[in-house]
Each structure stands twice: as C-alpha cells, then as structure tokens.
Amino acid sequence: GGVNTMWRLIAPGLFNAFAVVLFRSFYLSFPAEIEEAGRLDGLSYLGVYGRIILPNSATMIASLGALSFIDAWNSFLWPLMIGQDPSSWTVQIALSSFLTSQTVNLPQLFAGTAVAILPLVIMFLVAQRHIVQGIAMSGLKS
C-alpha cells in the first residue's frame, strides 16, 4: 500500500548511515574538557548536550542538511520504483521522460534542467558558509 505515496518517498531518507558516521566522528573528536566544564558548572548530561554540544554542532547539522537535500533532490531509482503515477514523480523522473528511444526533446529537457537546478543553487548559496565551516570543523583536533 505504499506505492504512489509521499511517505514511501520520504521514509528511506530519514535513516542515513552517513549521518550516523559523521556525527559519531564529530562527537568523538569533541573536547572532553568542555563537557567536564559543563558538568562542573552543574549541568546534567542532557544540559551539557543541549547547551554546549548541540550549539557547537550547528555547522555539522547544516552541512548534513545540505548534503541530504542534494541527495534527496537528485535521487532517481527509488522514486522511479515507488512513484508509478506521474503525479508522484520527482523532478529527475520527469526530466528523464524527455529522453525516450524514439525522440529526444532537448529544448524542453534543457529548460526543465535549468528550472530543476534553481533550488540546489539557492540552497548552496544560503548554506555555503555552514558547509565550509562544517568541513573545517571535521578536522578539529582534540
């Protein structure tokens, strides 16, 4: 009962092994002295996470959000298998419909590609600073 539903398109993207590895390596490289200072100031473990660690991982969250958005936007095979009705197609599947074995409609394909790339360009321009900081923080020495 999941064919042609938005839930089946979204659900696999919620579980990302890359995110687990990225955050695990970031949290392991986070200086233990800062966590201990928060505990000495009277914060609980949840308070240390919420007031110290989570704000410091904002750039990592923004980087992961940008990469996840690009991955979801460009996904082709899973939406092709799940979205059999043209109303549930993603942009990439709709663009592939301009290329058939009988005809190649290049003007519409190029126009559709120009429109489809706009959200990625806007997202990159907005999150560029966070992406660079997230990459720079991944090399943080403890």
Image (spheres, rainbow, N blue to C red):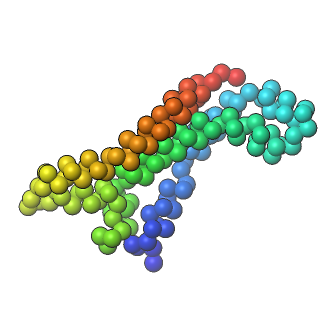
Q: On the image, which quarter does residue 93 sit in?
A: bottom left
Q: Quadrant of the N terminus?
A: bottom left
Residue at left offset 65%, top offset 37%? 57
Q: Residue 141 at x, y = what percent?
A: 65, 21
Query: In front: 55, or 12?
Result: 55
- The answer, for residue 27, to whether it is visible in the render is no
- The answer, for residue 36, to whether it is visible in the render is yes
Horizontal side of 62 relative to 24 (left or right) equals left
Q: Residue 94 at x, y = what percent?
A: 27, 60
Q: Residue 16 at x, y = what percent?
A: 53, 50
Furthest-left residue in this view: 102
Furthest-top residue in this view: 141
Residue at left offset 63%, top offset 24%? 140
Query: In front: 17, or 117?
Result: 117
Total label count?
Answer: 0
Residue 79 vertical placement versus 138 (above, below):
below
Q: Residue 68 at x, y = what percent?
A: 48, 47
Residue at left offset 23%, top offset 57%? 96
Residue at left offset 51%, top offset 31%? 129
Horizontal side of 13 relative to 59 (left or right) equals left
Q: Quadrant of the C terminus?
A: top right
Residue 34 vertical placement versus 121 (above, below):
above
Q: On the image, which quarter does residue 108 sit in?
A: bottom left
Horizontal side of 34 relative to 126 (left or right) equals right
